[in-house]
Amino acid sequence: MSEKATITLDGQTYEFPIVEGTEGEKAIDISSLRAETGYITLDFGYKNTGATTSSITFLDGEAGILHYRGYPIEQLAEQASFLEVAYLLLNGELPNAKQLQEFEGNIRYHSLVHEDMKRFFEFYPSNAHPMGILAAMVNSFSTFYPKSQDPNRSIKDVERTIFRLIAKMPTLAAISYKNNLGHPYMYPNNRLGYVENFIHMMFGLPTEDYEVDPVVADALNKLLILHADHEQNCSASTVRIVGSSQANLYSSISAGIAALWGPLHGGANQEVIEMLEAIRNDGSDLEKWVNKAKDKNDPFRLFGFGHRVYKNFDPRARIIKKSCDDILKKMGINDPVLDIAKQLEEIALRDDYFIERKLYPNVDFYSGIIYRAIGIPTRMFTVMFALGRLPGWIAQWKEMVENKEPIGRPRQIYTGATKRDYVPVKDRK
Ligand code: CMC
């Protein structure tokens, strides 16, 4: 592109190239800014800063568009399987039948977790949060598979690490749930599909035959796809930045899990249900809670509302809201919390505070109601988000490595004390 951006500093004008993406997004490439001018840019929360160019996910927050590798999220959620989408994110193209079969086979092959790792679970407190356990266990994989530590890893080793991660995360998640209940762990059943196997490990018992309900498997498949990637969000950026130091992939993903856990990010799905329940227990006075969310002196926020990039609607929330109705109907469940959620949404969407700030329900607003219907406990909701987001994190990490991106290292403007001399303790006032 021949267009340039000019910036005038201290009376001198500098030119910077404009970069345009395949969907028409534009950026000013300021890579040479500091070297040329001595200035840096300052952008708290990176609200205007592109950290990379990427060909994985396209998102238009104003138009409510989300594509993985060019495919609209609506089509993938309706028609694809989660592992197909994982393959797409990792490899750039949808797999043909043979490629998909091979990919599924590789994942299946690695679904067991090392027996020694099971012993770790004995030492977590019984009420340990499953996200804390997941982050620690995924990081622990790096100690069981030391080849993954080598920064000059072979393609085969990297592939194996990717298969292991995708294969073992559901097993770990299910073990942590069983541990919480004090129930025996279920081994993976490799005759089952990926999603079905997870459901079997979560809800099956060695004492009885367990039939996976296809309605539940369908719902979960859709939710995992909807969470599979979301370009440079907080956790994906964390994975990329940790990986940029050439830390191993397990540790990079573990860092992503930690970032996701926060209530402003993936942890919001747990907060939403707890909030809806608190509203219900408080007598369902919705106006009162909306007013609390608007009150700047009250730390309460309407969880599941607002998004850094979506300023019109979150396409994932639309799909989830609809499937929430469908699934509850199919399962014959009447959840009063769903009615509260719908009424809350209606009130907020009519309110000037939310309209002016372009705050709409996000992916986390209705997902918890589906998880609940399926039988997943509230504290596991963010683990479900992590299971879905895993292929996205890996694809982001892979792209960062393949692009040979430099170590991530932002700058700052120092605002602390200027130089002063050390005073020994005895002389200090
Ligand atoms: N309830 C009440 N007010 C809100 C909310 C909310 N949920 N979200 C934003 N605002 C207000 C905020 O107080 C600010 O008002 P003002 O301009 O008067 O100071 C304005 O809207 C802009 O908000 P912001 O916090 O500056 O926006 P952000 O882009 O930094 O934050 C967000 C985005 C998602 C962290 C925020 O909307 C939020 O905290 N939402 C609730 C948590 C949540 O649902 N998170 C899940 C996000 S979707 C899953 C994922 O991908 O992570």
Image (cartoon, rainbow, N blue to C red):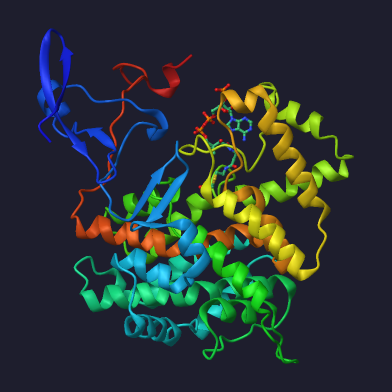
In the figure, is residue 280 to the left or right of 251? Answer: right
**Extreme residue toward the right, this view:** 283
In the figure, is residue 319 to the left or right of 73? Answer: right
Give the residue at x 63% y 77%: 199
* Residue 8 image position (x, y, % from top left): 16, 13
For residue 161, what is the image quadrant?
A: bottom left
**Extreme residue toward the top, this view:** 11
Q: Say if residue 374 shows up in the picture.
A: yes
* Residue 20 image position (x, y, % from top left): 22, 39
For residue 125, what is the image quadrant?
A: bottom right
Q: Is residue 374 above or below residue 52?
A: below
Give the residue at x 74% y 38%: 344
The residue nearer to you, when weighing 112 against 83, is 83
The residue nearer to you, when weighing 138 against 334, is 334
* Residue 200 image position (x, y, % from top left): 64, 82
* Residue 188 image position (x, y, % from top left): 56, 85
The residue nearer to you, when weighing 205 against 104, is 104
* Quarter, ligand 1: top right
Q: Say if residue 378 shows up in the picture.
A: no
In the figure, is residue 222 to the left or right of 394? Answer: right
Give the residue at x 31% y 28%: 412
